Image: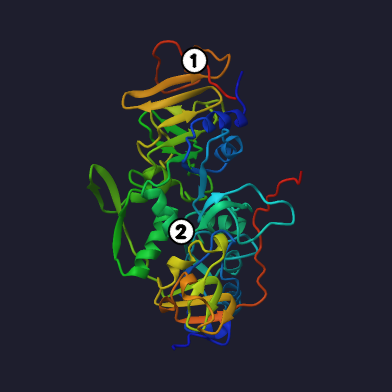
Amino acid sequence: MINKTVKSVQEALQGIEDGMTLILGGFGLCGIPENSIAELVRKGTKQLTCISNNAGVDDFGLGLLLQKKQIKKMISSYVGENAEFERQMLSGELEVELIPQGTLAERCRVAQAGIPAFYTPAGYGTEVAIGKETREFNGKMYVMEQAFKADFAIVKAWKGDTAGNLIFKGTARNFNPVMAGAGNITIAEVEELVEAGTLDPNQIHIPGIFVQRIFQGEKYEKRIEKRTVREKK
Amino acid sequence: MLLTKEDIAKRIARELKDGYFVNLGIGIPTLVANYIPEGINVEIQSENGVLGMGPFPFEGEEDADLINAGKQTITTLPGAVFFDSAMSFGMIRGKHVDLTVLGAMEVAENGDIANWKIPGKMVKGMGGAMDLVASAENIIVAMMHVNKAGESKILKKCTLPLTGVGCVKKIVTELAVMEITPKGIKLLERAPGVSVDYIVSATEANLIIEGEIPEMQIN
C-alpha cells in the first residue's frame, strides 16, 4: 500500500514557491481547503496565480491571500463577495480572468483526464470567445477551451484514507473531485483521516491515484456565507 | 395592474411540467420554487452540485456543507443527489435539465441576452450563466420590463456585453409574456388591466401582435 500521508500542512505545502499556479477547490466558502490557505498566508508565498471558482470574502478563504497581496492573478467564474478584491482589480494590482463556471470545471476535469482541449457552447458570441478557436458541430457553434496547467492542486474532502482516497460531503464536493489530479502535485486536506482499508471502496468518490499528499486538517471553521432559514410553524 | 416579482414567479411556475428538472437563477427565478403547482413534480438543480433542492433549513439546522449556487443554506428533498461541478455542467450542457429560468439586464429581438457585465462597473463574473444560456433548450427570462431609469430592457439589439446569443425562448415581465420567434418577439399575454399600447410604448423592440392578446393567468 502506498502511503500518501504527510505529517503537517507545512510538509504538505512543501515546494509551493513564488510565481506558481495553484488550483484550489471550493464553491464560495463551501469545501475550501482552509488549513492550506492559512498556511499559504503564514508562508507568505507571493505572485501566485490562483484558479478557483470564487475569491473568498474579505476575511476568509482566498480573501486572506488577497489581503496580503499574495495573488498576482485570479482565474474564477464569480468574484462578487469581496471588497478588497474589487479594490485590487480596479487599481490594476490584480489580474483577473473571468470564465464560465462549467468551462472552469471542465478545464480542470480534462487536465485530470489528460485531454488537452475540448469544445463548449458556453461563451460563443461573447467576449469570452475572443481569440479562441471556434467550430461548428451539427449546426451549432462551439468554442475551444484548453486544459489548465498548474503546479499544485489543493482540494478539501470530508474523509480520506492514508492511500489518498477521498469522500466528500454535501455540496462541499463541488470542484474538489475534478481538481484532484489537475495539477502536477495534488494536496488533499481532510476533516477525518483514516487508515487505508477503513473506507468502503464502493463509497469512495475520488481514487487516491489522483492525490500525492494527504493530511488531516484542524479547526475547520466552515463559515456560512449566506445563512438563510425559514420559520418553524 | 403591474405585477409584482412574486406574480412574475407565479406566472413562470405555470410553465413547469410534471417531471421537469429545473435550474433557477438568483432573484425572481428563485421565487418560482415557492409556486410549483399542485400535482406537478419537479426537481430543482443547483449548479454547485445538487439535484433535489428543498426549502431553507429551520433555524439551528443550517449546514455549512449544504448550500445552493447563491451560497444560501438549503435542505434536500427525498431522492436528492450531490455531484461535482463538471458533472453538474454536464447535466446542463447535455440538455438533461429541462428548463432554465434566469434574470437579465437586456434581451434582444433575436434572443440574445446580456446579464453579467456593465462596462465601467465592478464586474463580478458570469458564474454559470454563460454555460446555462448556451446549452438549455428552454430558457425563460424573468425580469422587470424596464430598468431603474425607465428604459426598456427588451431591445432591438443588446447594448451590454452578451452572455449568450440567440438563446432566450420566453420573457415574463410585470407587463407581459413574450415569445422569441424567428421573426422577432411575439406578444403572448398582457398583465391584467395593462393595454397592448402600454406594453408597446414600454418596449424598444418591435412586438409582433396577432389578434386579441389575452390577460395573464397568475393564480
Q: Which residue is drawn at the image coordinates 48% and 19% (left, top)?
A: B189
User: In what quadrant of the picture does the C terminus of chain A appear?
Assistant: top right
Question: Which residue carries the number 2 mark?
Answer: B85
Q: Earlier in the sequence, mark 1 or mark 2?
A: 2
> Where's residue A115, x and y in %?
30, 66
Which label number is shown at residue B214? 1
> Where's residue B33, x and y in %?
58, 40
Give the left or right position of residue B104, taking residue B192 as reference.
Answer: left
Density class for disc 2 (Cα within 10 Å; few <14, some 14-19, many ≥20) is: many
Callout 1: chain: B
Q: Are marks 1 and 2 on the same chain?
A: yes
Q: Quadrant of residue B66?
A: bottom right
Q: Is residue A157 visible?
A: yes
Vertical placement of residue A202 versus A107, above or below: below
> Where's residue B77, x and y in %?
59, 50
Give the left or right position of residue B78, taking residue A230 as reference.
Answer: left
Q: Is residue B156 visible?
A: no
Q: Which residue is drawn at the image coordinates 40% and 78% (left, top)?
A: A209
Q: Which residue is drawn at the image coordinates 44% and 22% (left, top)?
A: B204
Density class for disc 1 (Cα within 10 Å; few <14, some 14-19, many ≥20) is: few
Identify the image's colour scheme: rainbow, by chain, secondary structure or one colour.
Answer: rainbow
For label 1, the SS is: loop
User: In what quadrant of the picture does the N terminus of chain A appear?
Assistant: bottom left
Give the left or right position of residue B107, taking residue B73 as reference.
Answer: left
- Farthest right residue? A233
Callout 2: chain: B
Amino acid at dot 2: Ser
For label 2, the SS is: helix
